[in-house]
Amino acid sequence: MKLPKLGVLISGSGSNLQVIIDQCASVELPAEVVVVISSRNDAYGLKRANRHGIRAFDLSRNLFSSKSNYNLTILRILQECKVDLVIMAGYMRLLGAEVLDAYVNRIMNLHPAMLPSFPGAHGIRDALEYGAKWTGVTVHFADADYDTGPIILQEPVEILSDDTEDTLAERIHEVEHRLLPQAIKLYCEGKLRVVGRRVIIKD
Amino acid sequence: MKLPKLGVLISGSGSNLQVIIDQCASVELPAEVVVVISSRNDAYGLKRANRHGIRAFDLSRNLFSSKSNYNLTILRILQECKVDLVIMAGYMRLLGAEVLDAYVNRIMNLHPAMLPSFPGAHGIRDALEYGAKWTGVTVHFADADYDTGPIILQEPVEILSDDTEDTLAERIHEVEHRLLPQAIKLYCEGKLRVVGRRVIIKD
C-alpha cells in the first residue's frame, strides 16, 4: 500500500510535527512525513526531522530576493518530494498563490483558537485578553488569507479564571496534538469533501 | 429581603423572558421581573408579560421622532420601575448612550454564538454558513457596539453535519435558557466583578 506523503511546514519547536511523525511510525496514522520545511533556521523542528531521517529545509524568508521566489522554492520542494498533503503546523507565514493554487484543499493549517474568533499570530493571548470564557483549536484548509479557509475539525477549550498564557497554551496544545492527526487521518482515508465553505466528513 | 428588579428588553417571542419569569417565581432566581419593553408591537413576549401581571411597554422605534427620544424613554421607564439590572433577551436593537451610561455593567445581552465569532443579527445562520464545527452561546455586558462587551458566561454548542438553522437554533436556545438565568443569578448574588474586559466570577 502506498502511503500518502506529508510535507510539514513549521516555524518553531515542532511539537505537532513530532506527534505526526510518531503517529506515522505507529499504526495510528496511515501516512509518512517525507519533508519538513522551516521558515526559521533556528526552529527546533528541523532537528526533530534530522533525528528521524526526514529531509529538512531551512527556508528563512530573508534568504530569498522575493516572495514569489520564496513560494516557488517551497512549491518545487513539495513537488520534488511528491507531497500529497501539506501540513502547516505552527508555520507563521502566509503561503503564496504559487503554493495554494497547486495544493487546493490539500493544505491544512492548525490554529490555536475557535475560528473565526481570534485569527492571526496570537490566538491564545488574544482570547485571554478579550476575556473570552471559551476558546479552542481549529484545523482548516488554508486559503489566501490568514485563518479563513474551510474548517475541518474544531474542539472547544475552556478558559479558567486563573489561566495564564502558558497554562492555557498547555491545554490548547494537548487538543492540537489530538485534533491535527485526526484531521490528517480523515484526509488520508478519503473522508473529507469540501463543498463551498463546508467540509463534509464521511462516516 | 429586597429582590433585585429586572427590566427585560425583547423583540420577539420572549422564550428567554418566560424562563426568567418562571425561575423568579420559583426559588431558583432571587430576582423579580418588574417591566418588559419590546421594540416591536407584535412581540409575543408582551402577551407573556401581561399574563404574569408584569408592566409591559410597546416601544416600537417608529413611534419616536429620534433615536435619542427613543432611548430616553427606555431610560425613564427603567428608572421609573427602579430597575437594577437590564436584560436584553432577543432584543434586536442597539441601546443608546442614554441608557448605557446610566446602567454601566448592569445591562446583560444574550447572543446565540461564541463571541467574538458571529456577532450581529444572524449569529446562528452565520455560523452554519461559515462551515464552523462549533458555535455556542454568550452572555455579556452590553456596550456601545454590537456584541463586544465583557463576557460573563459562554458555553459551546457543536454543529452537527445534518443541522439546519432550525435544529441548531433549538439546541442553542436550550443552552440560552440555562445560561442567561445563571448569569442573572451570579449578578444578583453579587458574584460578578468587571476588571477591564474580563468578568471575574467569585466562588
Image (tube, coloured by chain):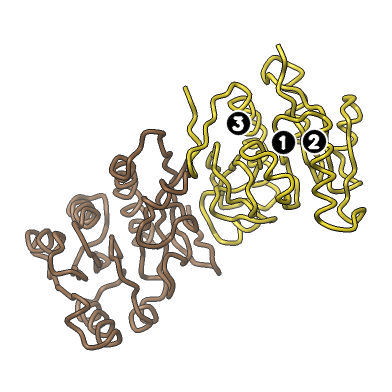
Chain colours: A brown, B yellow
The residue beneath circle 2 is: B78
Determine whether the residue tagged by mark 2 lies in a helix, strand or loop: helix
At a point 37% along the width and 53% down the height, the residue shown is: A112
**Same-chain status of marks 2 and 3:** yes
Determine whether the residue tagged by mark 3 lies in a helix, strand or loop: helix
Which chain's residue wears label 1? B
Which quadrant does the N terminus of chain B fall into? top right
Up-down relation of residue A163 to residue B129 (above or below): above
Whole-percent x and y of residue B82? 78, 28
Whole-percent x and y of residue B148? 58, 51
Up-down relation of residue A28 to residue A164 (above or below): below
Whole-percent x and y of residue B16? 73, 35
Name the outermost residue toward the top: B1
Which of the pair A1/B157 is nearer the observer?
B157
Q: Which mark is residue B183?
A: 3
Q: How many numbered marks does the figure carry?
A: 3
Query: Going from the N terminus, do you reach mark 2 or mark 3 first?
Result: 2
Q: Tell me whether circle 2 and circle 1 mark residues in contact (CB < 8 Å).
A: yes
Separation of residues labelled 2 and 1 (CA atoms): 8 Å
Which chain's residue wears label 2? B
Task: Tell me which amino acid carries mark 2.
Answer: Leu
Q: Is residue B23 left or right of residue A49?
A: right
At a point 65% along the width and 39% down the height, the residue shown is: B108
Whole-percent x and y of residue A85? 31, 69
Separation of residues labelled 2 and 3 (CA atoms): 20 Å
